[in-house]
Image (spheres, rainbow, N blue to C red):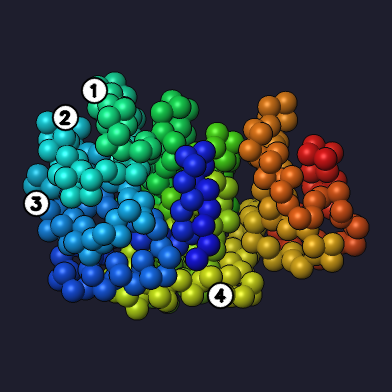
Amino acid sequence: MEYREIGKTGCRGSVIGMGCENLDGAPYEQVSDAISAALEQGVNMFDVFMPGQEIRENIAKAMGSRRKDVMIQGHVGSTDVREQYDISRDLPTVKQYFENLLRLFGYIDFGMMFFIDSQQDYKDVFETGFADYVLRLKENGDIRHIGFSSHNPVTAARVVETGLPEMMMFSVNPAFDLYPAETNVLDELHSTLDPTAFRGIDPRRTALYQLCQQRGLGITVMKTLGAGKLISPEHTPFAQPMTVTQCIHYALTRPAVASVMLGCRTGAEVRDAVRYLDATDEERDYSQVLSTLRNDFRGNCVYCSHCQPCPSGIDIAAVNKYLDIARLDQENIPPSIRSHYASLTHKGGECIECGNCEARCPFGVAIRQNMAEAARIFE
């Protein structure tokens, strides 16, 4: 298993995490099989947003004494008052469901303010006692870190700007990134992912990922496979379905992303997902999917690494990623970004300007120019 820093929390999460929603309603034997397989594979990130009592009990029982080896995302405001997944900002109701979660797991590593998508969601969290309750949970040691979940890049950026959260769970996949921010991607997901809406990666989503990287706020990923539609020959919005490996790799190449929370239902599905770690560069390459679309990516690096290998050994995608963050404010580049760049084995200044990378790039990125700019800024 590979592990990444989750922003500035001091925690390191497995790049393959487990979103447990698809275990809801499954018999205990199935839950135990999936959880045990995840633990055996080194998975240490689990999302438990589901408010139902039985699924929470089953997960806690399956973890048993191994609870100490994992980190749990538990959501504040996720309820099932109407016997279905629901959102509540009513504090007595919120406390009832979250304190039940605490009784089962002892503490929650990442207390997630649940589902902040709209302006009204933002007001209901930050202009009531909701956010104060979350702060008290952290002060009391009931949660270790404060996070939130969202599907809307504009609202999510506003939450990040408050300075309260230390991490975020966000829906990241190529189709969602191609939708305009004003589109309700959840509505699209439940109907048809419409490729005619694609206009290149929405700059507001790109800006959100870069903002998180700049602020040291880690991202865990939901909707990696677009509810399975991206890997379905029948439902994919692309010219061809993506593979699970391509979807995982796309998410993991976005700035600030630490872990991809996959909805595995069985131990076999867990082991299949973890095969990503052994995949070749060719198997991970998602540029072929993006390059079938109307090319609004021209000149912009999408961190696909199609340009590799570099004869100087430069990780071109990583250099471009740190350069993109630096360009946001060259006078105030976060120390963490400088540190990440400094830790690269080979840096932009080592570019020999052979141009092989630019010949391979599907999106016409001025890579040699970027390497020189990175050297000027960082070296």
Amino acid under disc 1: Gly
Circle nearer the N terminus (4, 3): 3
SS for callout 1: loop
- Image point (90%, 62%), residue name: 354
Upstream in the sequence, badge 3 or badge 1?
3
Residue at image location 46% in from the left, 46% down from the top: 11
- Farthest residue, direction front: 65
- From mark 4 to mark 3, how far is it between C-alphas? 41 Å
Q: Amino acid at mark 4?
A: Asp
Amino acid, disc 3: Glu
For mark 2, what is the residue? 91
Q: Nearer the viewer, mark 4 or mark 3?
A: 4
Residue that appears at 79% across and 55% down: 346
Q: Quadrant of residue 96?
A: top left
Residue 223, image x and y in percent? 39, 57
Q: Quadrant of residue 338?
A: top right
| Left or right, residue 48 beside residue 95 | right
Measured in 3D between alpha carbons, the distance from the residue under mark 3 to the one under mark 1, in whole angstroms, is: 25 Å
Secondary structure under tag 2 reads helix
Q: Which mark is residue 83?
A: 3
The residue to which callout 4 is attached is 278
